[in-house]
Amino acid sequence: MDHLELHALKQWFSGYCRSFYTPEPADQKNILLKEEHTARVIVNMAEIAGRLGLNEHARSVAEVIALFHDVGRFPQYHQYRTFRDSLSVNHATLGARVLTEQDVLRGLSVSDRELVLRAVSLHNVFSLPAQLDEETLLFVKMIRDADKLDIWRVFIGYYELPGKDRPNAAGLGLPDTPDYSTSVLDSLGKGEMVHLTSLRTLNDFKLLQLAWIFDLNFARSLELVRERSYVDRLSSTLPGTPEIAAAVKTVREYVDRKICVR
Ligand SMILES: [Fe+2]
């Protein structure tokens, strides 16, 4: 894949985003949010790929995966006016379908094309299927890290806004009360991922997002978490109870340990 091809794919993506632009301000804001998210995921992906020392071709494939990982968000929002997959469609599967139906990846080799489609499809699964080939696994792990790194930016930005300025789509519609669930906190304390189905409050969702740290795959990702103070910023929006402080400490120690070991 040469620079011209990569440029053409970026042009296609810009045009595709623009085709969903609307004069309705709230909807336009949501479309632009995903377009900006994509741009930042591309930067995160390049950070991770650079640290891994990937060759130029692999770095281009990584960029294409980042560019298209959320392409399904646009038709999803257009049709359902939500980004919640549970209320609409699986946006990753939809994205892979858009790329296939519009033959967007026709300029890529068959193996690159299939790799991109697999990575897009798997970027949001709760846990990865067993027996993925080594190459797919590498790129899927990269996009999952790059994506989470930007989702933290978006959500922490929302949580730091005064309640009245916060878009209500930011918290999955969960009640923003001082409560949180012991079961969710226990999972976090044990270093386990939390299922969306176990959430009752917005604080539970924040705890779930803290637990994502245990799912990161690369040292560079953990460094970016630390450089951007995501753990501190996220935890400062949580209730200051001793048990939350203890769980947050576990997370912070995990980040420090992983950066040292790798
Ligand atoms: Fe996504």
Image (spheres, rainbow, N blue to C red):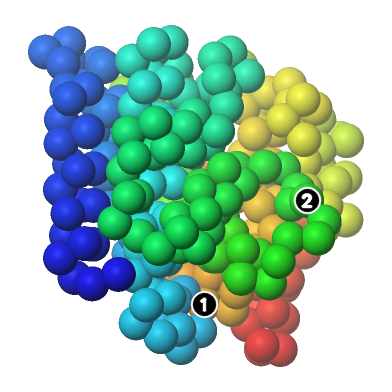
User: Disc 2 designates what residue?
Assistant: 129
Residue 220 circle label: 1
Mark 2–mark 1 distance (CA, rounded to whole Å):
24 Å
Image height of 20 relative to 241, above or below: above
Relative side of 194 to 230, left or right: right
Image height of 90 relative to 53, above or below: above
Residue at 17 percent of width and 11 percent of height:
24
Relative side of 10 to 44, left or right: left
Q: Is mark 2 within 8 Å of ligand 1?
A: no
Image height of 211 relative to 70, above or below: below
Q: Quadrant of residue 228?
A: bottom left
How many discs appear? Answer: 2
Of callouts 2 and 1, which one flags the residue occurring earlier in the amino acid sequence? 2
Farthest residue in the left direction? 23
Residue 156 visible in the picture: no
Relative side of 89 to 227, left or right: right
Amino acid type at image mark 1 = Arg
Q: The residue tagged with tag 1: helix, strand or loop?
A: helix
Q: Position of residue 196 (x, y in %)?
A: 72, 30
Residue at 44 percent of width and 46 percent of height:
69
Q: Is mark 1 within 8 Å of ligand 1?
A: no
Q: Position of residue 124 (x, y in %)?
A: 60, 42
Q: The residue tagged with tag 2: helix, strand or loop?
A: loop
Residue 155 circle label: none
Residue at 50 percent of width and 48 percent of height:
117
Q: Quadrant of residue 255?
A: bottom right
Residue at 88 percent of width and 56 percent of height:
190
Residue 216 visible in the picture: yes
Image height of 164 relative to 24, above or below: below
Amino acid type at image mark 2 = Pro
Q: Position of residue 131 (x, y in %)?
A: 81, 60
